[in-house]
Amino acid sequence: MINILLVSSDPGRTQQITAIIAASGIGHQLRTLANGLQQVCTDKDALQVTDLLIFDGYHLTGDDISALEKLSGRRRELVCTLITPSPSHELLIQAMRAGVRNVALWPIERDSFVADLKRVAGRRAEADHRDGQVLSFVSCKGGSGTTFLAANLGYAIASLRDKRVLLVDLNQQFGGAAHLVCDKTPPATIADVCAQIDRLDASFFDACLTHAYPNFDVLAGAGDPVKAVDIKVPHLERIVALIRHQYDFVIFDVGQSVNPVSIFALDHSDVIFPVLHSSVPHIGAGQRLLQLFQSLGYPGERVRVLVNQHDKRGQIALKTMEDVIGAKISKVLPNDVRAVLDSVNQGVPVIKQHKNSPISKSLSELAESLAPAPRASGTTRLTKLFRSKARVQPSPA
Ligand SMILES: Nc1ncnc2c1ncn2[C@@H]1O[C@H](COP(=O)(O)OP(=O)(O)O)[C@@H](O)[C@H]1O
Ligand SMILES: [Mg+2]
């Protein structure tokens, strides 16, 4: 079932498009709007449920392009189809930049229009069955950089890989993960969600999130040990059941405490990242944590040790660390004081601010290992149209 919003000011074209969709055999819900795109821009709820926006751009204006850009920025999953009688080279470039993924020529060529609908329906069905990967970050010792890595990896996966990511801050004290990556005040915390668990549904949960960036949401931590006590396993169970199908990645910043709630998060994690430094106190703590994971029955391949703030000139060899903790080191992240300090002080993700810094490169590699870049896929109709237009462009004198 796909949710289609058709925006057209022409009753004749609305009727024809509606008839093609109705005869397509694809399960759908169709709403039509005659008042232009501005109305969609102001109706957040309508946009939230729309999978496919078909815009009749017979008389396309610059305002329409800006509105399309705004809409596709607000909802990354939205597929925009633009209907136009004569797509010029410039218009195709503008449309592509505004997030339009399909361009249909008017009068509509039925077969290719229906093929586009089927593609959207396929993506929708996939999203409905999406079972997000769950990652957990655990501090072997306070100050290892767990929160910094969890939050910045979340942003890296969301921005570099176009995946929907939710960061859940399970820290009992100082739950400040959201502030590391954005300057928005969280509307609610996980403790607030748990206190009203009977109200939990997709829209209540959405209202409690910090929407840090288009693909990246944060559920803020309790921030207060007294409130954190009221977060119980059945609460987290209900939250996980809801979010697993809505996000490609759910990242728990578990912090340092091992308690029933954090063990629930770890039990449900596909990958657990213990974070430590290459120093004697950290190695001792890491050894005990990994023993605990063993006794909890977590298989070695699920536990990937991260050595953070590593200094190559340090006294402890990585091989020695591995021997002591009894596990392989999965990744070493550099000590990058300048870039990290700048990022945390300004509350901006480090790869946004210092893209080429050593720590950003390591975070990008980690993101790549978890969400590999897709191989070049088949050409969309928009790119085909664009290419055919590009071929007939006169070459500059
Ligand atoms: N790779 C790094 N290079 C330099 N500083 C780092 C790095 N990772 C984290 N830090 C710094 O370490 C401090 C502690 O990080 P934090 O994420 O709060 O640790 P934890 O959550 O494990 O207690 C932060 O102030 C951050 O600036
Ligand atoms: Mg922390």
Image (cartoon, rainbow, N blue to C red):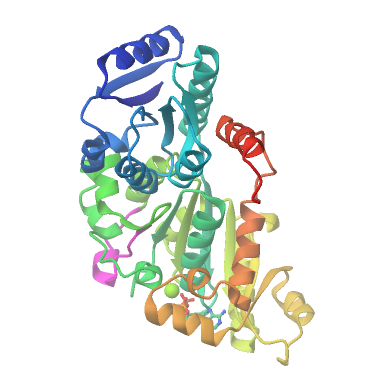
Q: Is residue 384 magenta?
A: no
Q: Residue furthest front?
A: 397
- Against 5, is 274 above or below? below
Name the foreground residue: 259 vs 106.
Answer: 106
Picture coordinates of residue 248 (x, y %)?
50, 46
Residue under the image location 36 percent in, 11 percent down: 16
Name the foreground residue: 145 vs 24.
Answer: 24
- Against 336, is 355 above or below? above
Picture coordinates of residue 35 (x, y %)?
20, 30
Q: Quadrant of residue 4?
A: top left
Q: Residue furthest top?
A: 23
- The magenta segment is 218-232
Residue under the image location 66 percent in, 57 percent down: 369
Residue under the image location 41 percent in, 46 percent down: 240
Observer able to see residue 143: no
Number of numbered discs on residues: 0
Picture coordinates of residue 99 (x, y %)?
45, 43
Name the foreground residue: 73 vs 217.
Answer: 73
Q: For this view, does 54 lie left or right of residue 208?
A: right
- Against 390, is 105 above or below? above
Q: Is residue 219 magenta?
A: yes
Q: Main secondary structure of the magenta part?
A: loop
Observer able to see residue 312: yes
Q: For this view, does 148 lie left or right of residue 300?
A: left
Picture coordinates of residue 221 (x, y %)?
33, 65
Name the foreground residue: 246 vs 181.
Answer: 181
Quadrant where the image shows the N terminus: top left
